[in-house]
Amino acid sequence: MIDRLVDYVVSDAPRTRDFRLAALALAVLTVFLFTFRQPVYPGPDFDEGAYVNVAKTFAEDGIYAEKNLDGYNFLGPVISTGPTVILPIALLFKFVDPSIPAARLTIAAYGLLMMASLAILCLRLMRPQAVLLAVLLVLFGWGNQMPYMFRLVIGEGPGLALLFTGLVLWLTERPGPIRLVLTGVLFGLVTITKVQYAFFVLPALLLMWIANMLWYRQRRWDYFVIPGIVSGVIFFGWTYFTYFLNGVGIRDPAADMSTVQAAAGSAYFVLDVTNKVQNVYNLVNGTIHGGLFIPAALYGLWRSRRRTGDGLIWGILTAMLLLSSGFYILSIGWVRLSIATKIMAALFVAAFVFDAFKAVVQATRSTTSRDSDMTPRWIALMLVAGWLIFTVVLPSFRAIYYVVRLGDASAYMVGAYLTENALPETIVESWEKELSLISDHVYHFPPQLVEAQVNAYEHRLSDTPAGELYDFRDFVDPAYVVIGPLGRKGELYSAEKLADFALVETFGPYEIYARR
């Protein structure tokens, strides 16, 4: 029985019906993980509140900016996440009332696109059994971040959806000029969706163009140059627009550039050896694809060595994996900066595990008897099964439990309280930007420099807490102050500043203070 099971697992031609049923089950599971109880798990947070605010402002005012009592902010969410996230949501808001749950449906759609394009790409590179494993690893193999990522309005997921779609379009033997231009457009959109993706997508194109000329010699020059030029033009063009052209006439360019310079030091990179060691550990520890990141990356290099079309494709993917890994290791270490690396690594781990298991089976199989010693194959099967339980099965139960049982509706309760007790023109001071999408009041947010100072203080780049630099009373005279996770983290609202306010209600992590 074990022999038949092993043969089926490594079969070069698994039954089509079985593969289709497994793919359908995974598709249903993916839809469930990305959409079930989407409004409350996870609870609305600061970042998506800022991004959805930009989409709402563009839909209502036609201005690509974040809006609050001080006016329009052309930095922050405007430059940290691109139009590929903002504009589809803004278009949706032309037909439905602006809200975080509605915006999250757009991100879920991106999630389904990413999973579909990833599966198509994998089918070109590996056996169907390995494709199913790759999909499972993407969903569950890296610490339950995957369902979470496509349930929040953030740019990391949409950027990867566009990346894998571009790779599917590009990684063919003889793509025509139109296909190459479309590939460049998609790669360009990737780089403006999240700027950190530009740090590995654009260099990978350049590196592999050189590698093709010197080693592979499998593609013409235009295979790399056209996508590289188109994607570069989109990236640098959008960057120039956001910093210098967007909001001309209604923004203060000098003040904005001063804010950008102040924030630049803590934006992505810190020079801290302890931080770098921790970043490496975050990629190679056992909770990330069962600890197989390094063997899988080495396997990718080994697959890339051949001067063939297949070797070139593996070379492209390996270059992106290693460059994204290098960027994360050198970075400040935020979890979201590692998302691209961990998802791409799933492809390599799946191919490595399947091919390694198949190699063991073939090496131990007798050429004369099917009843040869089963011990090596039995051991290999048990090792893979144990690894799967640890890496996929147990995390899948956790992910499903989180989706079904966890969640936080506190932000909606805050909105309901303010709606019931305050007129729409009431001024509310808060750094919890998600609230501006939940209640129709006049919100005042701390200036963009405050966020930069919070990051600098957190990573020991400054000795001054943000709360010492910001006093909301210098900017606004609110009727309410709402303190949530971010305001508490930044220590922005001390007891002395709230002397004229009284705590009137608490919902989860949110505290509502009303003027006495």
Image (spheres, rainbow, N blue to C red):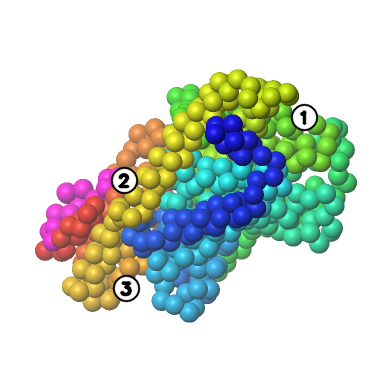
Residue 473 bears which disc, if any? none
Front residue of this view, candidates 46 and 143: 143
Mark nearest the camera among 1 and 3 is: 1
Front residue of this view, candidates 465 and 159: 159
Query: Does 118 sit left or right of 53 as displayed?
Result: right
Location of residue 69 in the rendering, given as x and y in whole percent from the top left corner: 36, 67
Secondary structure at numbered mark 3: loop
Q: Residue type at mark 3: give it.
A: Asp
Residue at numbered disc 3: 440
Residue at numbered disc 1: 305
Real-space CA distance between mark 3 and mark 2, rounded to the nearest whole angstrom: 25 Å
Secondary structure at numbered mark 1: loop
Residue, far bottom: 95
Location of residue 283 in the rendering, given as x and y in whole percent from the top left corner: 51, 32
Location of residue 414 in the rendering, given as x and y in whole percent from the top left corner: 24, 64
Which region is colored magenta?
486-504
Q: In the picture shown, does residue 331 fall above or below 46?
A: above
**Around disc 3, counting alpha carbons within 10 Å, would you say few (fewer than 14), some (14 to 19), or many (20 or more)?**
some
Q: Is residue 167 visible?
A: yes
Q: Residue type at mark 1: give it.
A: Arg
Is 494 colored magenta in this rendering?
Answer: yes
